[in-house]
Amino acid sequence: MKRKGASDTRDWWKDGIVYQIYPRSFMDANGDGIGDLSGVISRLDYLNDGTPGSLGVDAIWFSPFYPSPMFDFGYDISDYKSIDPAYGTMADFDRLLVQAHKRGIKVILDFVPNHTSHLHPWFVESRNSRTNPKRDWYIWSAPSRPLKRRYTDGAEPPRRYRPNNWQSIFGGPAWTWDEKTQEYYYHHFLVEQPDVNWRNPELREAMYDQMRFWLDKGVDGFRLDVINFIFKDKLLRSNPYCIGRRPYDMQRHLYDKDLPENIEVVREMRRLVNSYGDRMLVGEIANDDPNEPARYYGNGTDGLNLSFYFHFANQPFCADSFGSAVAAWETAVPKAAWPVYFLSNHDRMRHIGRYHARNEARTLGRAQVAAMLLLTVRGTPFLYYGEEIGMANLSIKKKDLQDPVGIRYWPIPVGRDPERTPMQWDNSTSAGFSSAAGTWLPVNPDYKAVNVAAQADDPSSLFSFYRKIIWKRKESAALTRGTIEILRETPRGILAYLREYGDDRCLIVLSFSHEAVDFTPKDDGGPIGGRNRWRVLVSNRRDEADRLLSVTWNIKPLEATVFSYKK
Ligand code: NOJ
């Protein structure tokens, strides 16, 4: 891969590390078994108190905490400008913002532009009558052919009357019959999450108004939920069929997502946040083709600031796969834009489970390699709460399931509860997450060993490794803003890349192998090892006093090391 550019502007969302908090599961201050904003405030020092004893992250992204009937745990919003009582009050939020900012931690909110809750007053009005002024704020359609009678009392027209073949990603048809007005409304997700109509200028303005509310309060940006879904085909054409597992996957989604109009709205949103100064937008475009998320950067300065890259998180634990995924992303991202990486979030199995090995030591090694990769490639890293202590995916009993997707498809393990269990702080009741013994999702029973308190003073713990990398990264211009060049001709199982900024040069070597491997690092000018100039900056397998005297280095199994030198 050719060397890719450095960043010469010092934007916090480029240099920093973002930490995702799922508010229900981070910290419960009022003892009801559900996380809350006061709980988060009490743990801000853990996230960053300005010393290397804390994790050292620079921003928090909060999954939604707005009022919601919780059919999709907050991704079904019934009021964009308020706080759900389960999480606290607006006064708590204001306190949280002040306290986070005091510590230099930026605050990014989840913004859900594609749909609202069916209980949002906009939808309640919209479904009131066909002539309601808000009717067109949602996506309504008459049956595809004239009805011979009214369908009421739970009856609905036969399937062929549906406007088209679109499916809900969570299962079932995407059209739900509305008895009162004898039309269908559209929902890409749950029946309780009707999609809004971005073609309606009033709706558009209303959405921007919700964003302004939080920007005026001083939040630092938004994560845009399924931003690639917001426009649907004007003619509501049916999708062509293809081979797939579930009905949703048996269609090529030509007409219900990824429409070119989406990017226009992103541009408008960028202009809006730019008018507030130093704010940012990060967008969710879950697509394995790197060109899709890349498109949402616009020309690199007029679209999203950061666009999530799912293909990276979909890789197996393999040097070549990750190397190719990074190279593909580097090629796709516009020159003026900045990449972003994550491995875990609230919708996917935690990566420690995906990379699980035969024994604990290897699993830890793999988690260290993954952490080093995530925190040292060129781009902004997003961490998911608990990954820094190696929280695992918990298999949840049927009776404890919460996620509608998990409930619908049980026993197929596609639900998202396993990665949403309460944060494990210590070995007391409910892992120190709550004073209540019963929590909204069960605490993983491994909390006695896997918790923050147990790992904080243990230099060999995963938490210590995360902290070490994060704090070293802050001091290194090469790691935060430098160019990247992936080395060619690496032995099997080794991924190595150079990061460079001015005088500062880092060589990151990651071994995905369970064997030791000899490696002669080379760039285009030949071998770059030896000559006593490389130092170990941070490593899970080497001492900082280690000197690399020869051109060939013996890389240990599952080694993750940053070597550095100043030119
Ligand atoms: C993506 C979110 O990450 C997911 O949790 C949610 O269920 C859907 N969008 C619908 O909002």
Image (cartoon, grey):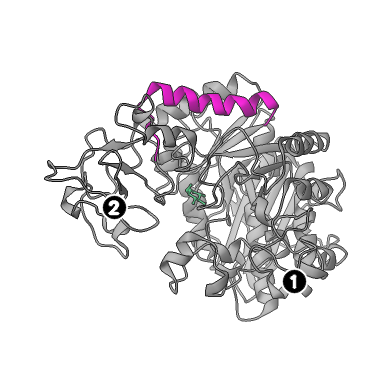
Task: Tell whether 326 sits left or right of 379.
Answer: left
Residue 123 x/y as whole percent = 42, 36
Q: Residue furthest top?
A: 275
Task: Tell whether 491 sits left or right of 360.
Answer: left
The secondary structure that dominates the magenta segment is helix
Establish if 299 lies above or below 282.
above
Residue 447: which disc? 1
Residue 549's quadrant in the figure?
A: bottom right
- Asked if one can make out residue 280 in the rendered structure from this viewpoint, the answer is yes
Q: Is 465 or 278 nearer to us in this picture?
A: 278
Residue 114 x/y as whole percent = 44, 39
Residue 82: which disc? none
Cβ of disc 1 within 8 Å of ligand 1? no
Q: Which residue is mark 2?
A: 153
Label 2: few (<14), some (14–19) or many (≥20) C-alpha neighbours in 10 Å = few
- Asked if one can make out residue 520 in the rendered structure from this viewpoint, the answer is no
Q: Is residue 558 magenta?
A: no
| Part of the protein shown in magenta | 195-219
